[in-house]
Amino acid sequence: MSSAPLRSPPLRPPRMKKDESFLGKLGGTLARKKKAREVSDLQEEGRHAIDSPMSPASVDVHPEDTLLEENEERTMIDPTSKDDPKFKELVKVLIDWVNDVLVEERIIVKQLEEDLYDGQVLQKLLEKLAGCKLNVAEVTQSEVGQRQKLQTVLEAVHGLLRPHGWALQWTVDAIHGKNLVAILHLLVALAMHFRAPIRLPEHVSVQVVVVRKREGLLHSSHITEELTTTTEMMMGRFERDAFDTLFDHAPDKLSVVKKSLITFVNKHLNKLNLEVTELETQFADGVYLVLLMGLLEDYFVPLHNFYLTPDSFDQKVHNVAFAFELMLDGGLKTPKARPEDVVNLDLKSTLRVLYNLFTKYKNLE
């Protein structure tokens, strides 16, 4: 007798992974318990939250994600904001910067919220930037250990940033909860504080969806989070100087200052048959800055140390950064400006650099 043919089990549609749904990516800041509830009820709650007048954009909510405790709140970036080119650029620039800083540690960050939440990468990043060693365990697997490490790292960050007026828009709960907005706020602050050699896109804002459970129902709202303003404004959190005042309150005197600086630089560059007429453009590639430092300090700068005819942004940044190194060697303070700002024709940055030279070498023949 032949045996009955084997029947394959019926195919079932694959379950949606929680982290693939909209609110599943939130990263809660509070522990969440799952209560037994009918799927239809959950769907009704999600529909009520998303269709409420406070939530203008429709959002796809998976029922499993609506299990919040009373008064519990979740936040995440609206998907439309994640598609914004400036937001994508900000994330990429910050990831590349972190990886450049940590290249010797053989650490590669691919996704900010997944790679920075436990404090390990942030510890290494701060130690490298600040030149310090934090008293924390090198490897922590438990959630308690991760939070303790993160607490120590953030306390060290706060000690550096708070005196300079930075609003601390992140917490241990937010970072450990993989809140991307909080992580971006933290990295932007660190990049600006340590004057990272990067150019952050300006005026980057995101729409953030906030979902809170009140009286058994979900309520959602949208808020706008400003991640970057202008480079000048963000740098201005640290200190304002005479040039800020000059630009803001006495623009009529700007031409006098520019004329004085042009006279100063030409006094020395003329020795090489060079002449400057436009400060913001003629110093942007760094060549004149390097040559000027050699003239002021009375030495020849080997041509292999810089690009005499730079033809790319990176080569120009290299030249300006090299000139800054020569300034430090000459006993000058670190310029407040960044090389990228000078290359990008930022007049105020260029004036700061040249005035720094003027104050030291103005009496040099």
Image (cartoon, grey):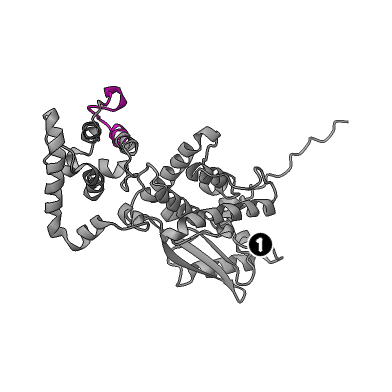
Q: Identity of the amino acid at label 1?
A: Ala
In magenta, the rendered stretch is 301-320
Q: Nearer the viewer, residue 141 or 223?
A: 141
Q: Is residue 314 left or right of residue 223?
A: left
Q: Which residue is mark 1?
A: 31
List the single residue furthest toward the bottom: 215
Q: Nearer the viewer, residue 64 or 247?
A: 247
- The image quadrant that residue 174 belongs to is bottom right
Question: Can the viewer see residue 78 in this picture?
Answer: no
Q: Quadrant of the C terminus?
A: top left
Within the magenta stretch, is there residue 42? no
Q: Is residue 365 left or right of residue 20?
A: left
Q: Residue at (46%, 50%) from the top-left corner?
A: 187
Residue 68, placed above or below residue 107: below
The local secondary structure at tag 1 comes to: loop
Q: Residue at (70%, 66%) from the top-left corner?
A: 35
Q: Is residue 57 left or right of residue 247?
A: right
Question: Can the viewer see residue 259 in this picture?
Answer: yes
Q: Residue at (41%, 61%) from the top-left corner?
A: 165
Q: Position of residue 99 (x, y in %)?
A: 48, 38
Residue 243, placed above or below residue 102: below
Q: Position of residue 131 (x, y in %)?
A: 50, 43
Q: Quadrant of the N terminus?
A: top right
Q: Nearer the viewer, residue 348 or 315?
A: 348
Characterize the local packing of mark 1: few (<14), some (14-19) or many (20 or more) Cα atoms within 10 angstroms.
few
